[in-house]
Amino acid sequence: MLPFISKKNNKSILSLDDIKLPSHVGIIMDGNGRWAKKRGLPRSAGHSAGANNFRTITRYCNKIGIKYLTVYAFSTENWKRPEDEVGALMKLFKSYLQEAIADFKDENIVVKFIGDRNAFSPELQSLIDENEKLSADRTGMVLNIAMNYGSRDEIVRAVKNIAVDVKDGCLTIDDINEKVISDNMYTAGQPDPDLVIRPSGEYRISNFLLWQSAYTEYIIMDVLWPDFNTGMLDDALIEFARRNRRFGGV
Ligand code: IPE
Ligand code: IPE
Ligand code: MG
């Protein structure tokens, strides 16, 4: 079931060369656990497969000219999972972060982390900082990795920052507008996501980019994240190009 994508009306008619790509794509990388379960493997094996697929899809997005990619890797709610699963995820983050320092150099990718990094171990936090520092001057795709990210948490943080600015007299209440709020989000200065893809078939947002996705197009795909491939991404991009975005107009 690919509820919003019909191959017949889609890929056979259009190719990526014919369409305008979205500037900012979000992906909720969901379904690792079910992928592992189907194979009789531990959930951690699904996360390893998911992490490998993340590497493939990220490179592909950069290659085809996506300007901003935001991937949801770990939510503020994912801490409630069993300790061994969270531990396996932290290990995967560490090895990915170590490798990414060298890896994305040739690809010219700017790496940013969105979410509350204070919850991670000092070692992970310094790898996060190092990745951001080393990639800051690159000119290719901006890759936002959402780790310990929750949209509600992000909004609370923004409200607190704005309240401090008002208290300190840098801002008046009348100055507060949508731009001020956007500028206090982790994604400050970036365009809102045009398209969010959710593999795994779940029809929900799960606390991802609530403020930023007011007019985002959603594509839900019935494939588990480790099985999601570049052809499916092409299908989603083509489907996106066929949507009529009205932003409340006519
Ligand atoms: C997404 O896959 C990865 C994280 C949330 C960290 P899941 O682990 O949620 O996989 P399912 O949804 O249980 O299949
Ligand atoms: C969303 O997936 C978070 C990530 C993919 C990182 P979840 O698996 O945590 O979402 P729910 O629990 O199905 O809503
Ligand atoms: Mg899930």
Image (tube, rainbow, N blue to C red):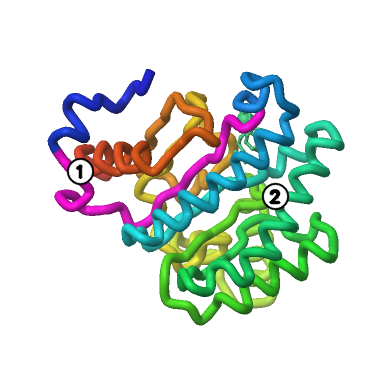
Q: Kindly identify the amino acid type of the residue bearing the numbered disc 1.
A: Gly
Q: Earlier in the sequence, mark 1 or mark 2?
A: 2
Provide the residue designation for mark 1.
Answer: 249
Image side of residue 241 versus residue 167, left or right: left
Looking at the image, which residue sits at the far bottom?
137
Provide the residue designation for mark 2.
Answer: 148
Q: Residues within 10 Å of mark 1 (few under 14, many from 20)?
A: few
Q: Position of residue 137 (x, y in %)?
A: 51, 81
* Helix, strand or loop status at disc 1: loop
Quadrant of the image containing the N terminus = top left
**Are discs 1 and 2 less than 8 Å apart at CB?**
no
Image side of residue 93 versus residue 221, left or right: right
State the extent of the magenta-drawn residues as a range: 14-33
In this orientation, does residue 159 appear?
A: no
Height in image: 61 above or below 225? below
Residue 129 falls in image quadrant: bottom right
* Residue sitting nearer the eye, 176 or 94: 94
Rendered residue at 58%/35% (across/down):
206
